[in-house]
Image (spheres, rainbow, N blue to C red):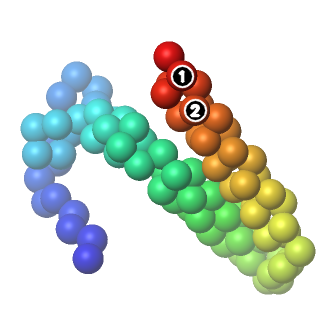
Amino acid sequence: MLVVATTFRYNKGTISVGGEFVFTKYKKFKEKRPYANVILIMIFTSFIGILIEYIVNKDFIGSGLYPAVAFTLIGVLRVKRRNKTKQDL
């Protein structure tokens, strides 16, 4: 279940939710769950691309999902390699 905070405060040009900056929360999420971050980014960007394609051409091109899957795999491999180098240090 997605819970959205109702209070947004404007503090020095950055939106904060519940006293903590949104980007700080995102950075913590990215460090804690790097694989989920890659998948979340790919789902979000694929949705935007599909939406734009549908608005412009009123069409859905299914073959466009193959590059998205390939980029997701590349992102997961990058995260895996980054985690491996962190463990070696």
Q: Amino acid at mark 1?
A: Asp
Find residue 1 and report its image quarter: bottom left
Q: Are marks 2 and 1 in contact (CB under 8 Å)?
A: yes
Task: Give the quarter of the image for residue 28.
Answer: top left
**Res. 76 in view:** yes
- Of residues 79 and 9, the one nearer the viewer is 79
Please tell me how many numbered marks the rendered image carries: 2
Instruction: Determine whether 67 is above or below 10 in the image.
Output: below
For disc 1, the marked residue is 88
Left or right of 49, for residue 88:
left
The residue lying at 62 percent from left, 58 percent from top is 42
**In the drawing, what numbered circle is on residue 74?**
none
Q: Position of residue 70 (x, y in %)?
A: 80, 57
| Image coords of residue 72 (percent x, y) | 69, 55
Dot 2 lies on which element?
A: helix
**Snapshot quadrant of residue 85:** top right
Query: What is the C-alpha distance between the residues marked 2 and 1?
Result: 6 Å
Residue 84 tag number: 2
Few, some or many C-alpha atoms within 10 Å of disc 1 (few <14, some 14-19, many ≥20)? Answer: few
Q: Position of residue 43 (x, y in %)?
A: 59, 64
Q: Is residue 60 shown left or right of residue 35?
A: right
Name which residue lies at 75% across and 63% down: 69
Q: Position of residue 83 (x, y in %)?
A: 53, 34
Looking at numbered disc 2 in the image, what kind of residue is underneath it? Lys
Left or right of residue 35: residue 69:
right
- Placement of 30 over or under 61, stated as above or below: above
**CA neighbours of label 2 inside 10 A, class few (<14), some (14 to 19), many (20+):** few
Element at label 1: helix
Q: Is residue 52 visible?
A: no
